Image (spheres, rainbow, N blue to C red):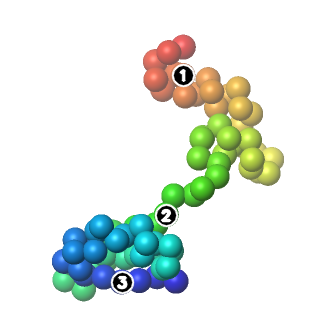
Amino acid sequence: MTKYVSAKEFRNRLPHIADDLKQWREIVVLKHSQPLFKVVPVEERPLDLLERAASSDDPLRPELDEIAAMVHRIRGVV
């Protein structure tokens, strides 16, 4: 379920957003009646990129060692 709130209401409710997310699962913040951004809870498991790749059943996904090599290349660690 999605809850729509104004930017002002979002600022006022900021200390309670975690509780609101438990209830609503998704909060869309509006400014001048237009969607500005969406707040959603983080997935509980798995959070790590390599764990997520390992848990996928997609036959086209790269192997974990390929993903690790890509991450190291991006970071310049090679």
Residue placed furthest toward the top:
78
State if disc 2 and disc 1 touch (CB < 8 Å): no
Eyeballing the image, is 45 above or below 37? Answer: above
Compute the Cα span from label 3 to label 2: 15 Å
Q: Quadrant of the C terminus?
A: top right
Kind of residue indicated by mark 1: His
Kind of residue indicated by mark 3: Tyr
Identify the residue under disc 3: 4
Of the two numbered discs 1 and 2 in the rendering, the one whose residue sits closer to the viewer: 2
Dot 3 crowding, Cα within 10 Å, few <14, some 14–19, many 20+ = some
Identify the residue under disc 1: 72
Residue 15's mark? Answer: none
Compute the Cα span from label 1 to label 2: 28 Å
Dot 1 crowding, Cα within 10 Å, few <14, some 14–19, many 20+ = few
Query: Which circle's residue, 3 or 1, is located before the other in the chain?
Result: 3
Of the two numbered discs 3 and 2 in the rendering, the one whose residue sits closer to the viewer: 2
Identify the residue under disc 2: 41
- Whether residue 28 sits left or right of residue 67 in the image: it is left
User: In which image quadrant can residue 63 be found?
Assistant: top right
The residue under the point 74% across, 49% down is 56
The x and y percentages for residue 6 are: 25, 81
The residue under the point 22% across, 75% down is 12
Looking at the rendered structure, the number of numbered marks drawn on it comes to 3
Q: Nearer the viewer, residue 23 or 72?
A: 23
Kind of residue indicated by mark 2: Pro
